[in-house]
Amino acid sequence: MTTFEAGPEAPWPATEQEWEQVRSFNKKLALMPRFRIRNRITPRVIQALLRVSQIGSAGKLLKHGLKAERKVIGVGGVPVPVRIIRPKGKAKGVVLDFHGGGWVIGNAQMNDDFNVAMVNTCNVTVVSVDYRLAVSTPVEGLMEDCLSAARWVLNDDSREFAGLPVIVVGESAGAHLAVATLLALKQWPGLLQRVNGALLYYGVYDLTGTPSVRAAPPETLLLDGPGMVEAFRMLTPGLSDEQRRQPPLSPLYGDFTDFPPALMFAGELDPLRDDTLELADRWVKSAPVERYLLPSSPHGFIHFPTAVAASVLVYSREWITAQVGAVGFNRL
């Protein structure tokens, strides 16, 4: 694989017909309401609808010959529920998954389709973290949950995961929590060294708003771009912008020394575009980074029925497999 060096983004290989498919789907997105955080009631309603939609999901896993275990784990007195999906054979590695949802919706089950594909293709066990949500818990509490889960997975005393390479995966708010967790793990260098890669999709890394967030036009797709700065303030009440910029709350300003290799994706039409671009510029000074800025692509694009989204997910799984197989070589 080609290692990205800070500078122009690597082009994503797709045909003009495939990009036209993306643009066509964007027209449908433009008719939909944008996700926005304005109160605590709407996220609760969405969360309830999500759980209803997930009833009977165990049957989907059984079709692949898999099952999920729900388990409460954690260290330091911080119990955290996780959803564990194991491969049919011996696992070659572990994926620690942090779901998205703007910190206020989502759960460990929502990424089952993606996680099943990783389990089957990469021969890894996926541990998806069911962290608390910000409708009832401060963002710092969510970060505490994620760190507790990571320490449990990475602890060498774990009978199941001892010695296995670990890949951290996060999407959107989950990418924020993933990088914040890696920064917090610097307190335990031995645990951080066990992380062999970070796969990050269009994350939020500056809770004061990067330039692309602050300059987002009214017509942003999926996300309420113009309202994001106010949403960040609602999520971190009582803090000044200077306090919001402090890592790990705003991971962009952290110390990436001794970090693992990373693969990052961002969409050209995503208000959070600059978060990924600026994070890559800082991260690459310490470790190899591949970053891709996808033309005509909005936030959340890996969930959409396009050939480009499918190719991104295929490449992501290939990258995970390569990182798992490169144990002992990543940090020479």
Image (spheres, helix red, strand yellow):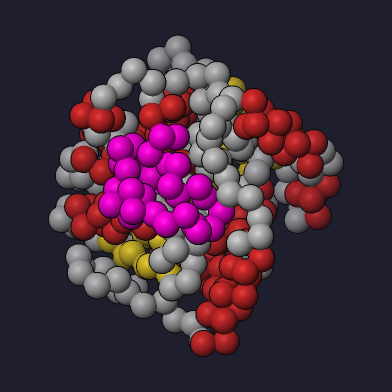
- Residue 254: image quadrant is top left
The stretch drawn in magenta includes residue 211: yes
Q: Which quadrant is home to the C terminus?
A: bottom left
Residue in the picture at 54% in, 61% down: 301
Q: Position of residue 213 (x, y in %)?
A: 36, 50
Residue 148 placement, left or right of 63: left
The stretch drawn in magenta includes residue 309: no
Q: Residue lying furthest front in this view?
A: 218
Tell me where the magenta segment starts and ends, as one range: 202-231
Q: Is residue 142 visible?
A: yes
Residue 125 placement, left or right of 328: right
Q: Position of residue 100 (x, y in %)?
A: 53, 43
Residue in the picture at 41% in, 66% down: 268
- Residue 248: image quadrant is top left
Magenta highlight: main SS: loop
Residue in the picture at 17% in, 44% down: 257
Q: Nearer the viewer, residue 107 or 49?
A: 49
Q: Position of residue 209 (x, y in %)?
A: 32, 43
Above or below residue 170? Residue 5 is below
